[in-house]
Amino acid sequence: MPRKLDNEWLSERLTATGLNTLEALAEATGINKGTLSKYFSGRQKPSIDVVQPLCAALAVSPETLLRQLGAYK
């Protein structure tokens, strides 16, 4: 069963970076909005090739991102 993730964290990061929406994050990273939704709902773990663009867009370290996505404990 997928783990429920902290969407408040994502919302805070989107606001802090001026992206504000998942659609804006998709545009900034080149990652499909549906795929992002799966990552942040815990239905799919991110592949290694998306970690760097997500970290850059959300201004977080890879460790922080992976912890929030439930891919790293």
Image (tube, rainbow, N blue to C red):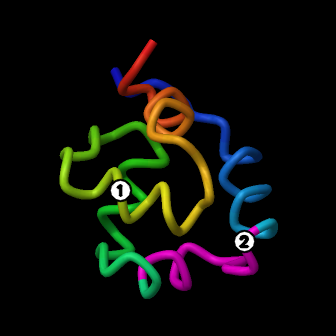
| Residue depicted at 59% across the width and 61% down the height | 58
Q: Above or below — where is 1 with respect to 40?
A: above
Badge 1 amino acid: Gln
Rendering coords of residue 56 (x, y %): 50, 63
Residue assigned mark 1: 52
Q: Secondary structure at mark 2?
A: helix
Q: Nearer the viewer, residue 27 or 44?
A: 27
Asked if residue 20 lies in the magenta stretch, the reply is yes
- Give the residue drawn at x 19%, y 46%: 47
User: For the point 45% across and 12% down, which residue is it?
Assistant: 73
* Left or right of residue 14: residue 67: left
Q: What residue span does the magenta drawing correspond to?
A: 17-26
Q: Main secondary structure of the magenta part?
A: helix
| Mark 1 / mark 2, whichever is N-terminal | 2
Which quarter of the picture shows residue 18?
Answer: bottom right
Q: Looking at the picture, does residue 71 appear above or below residue 28?
A: above
Q: Which residue is mark 2?
A: 17
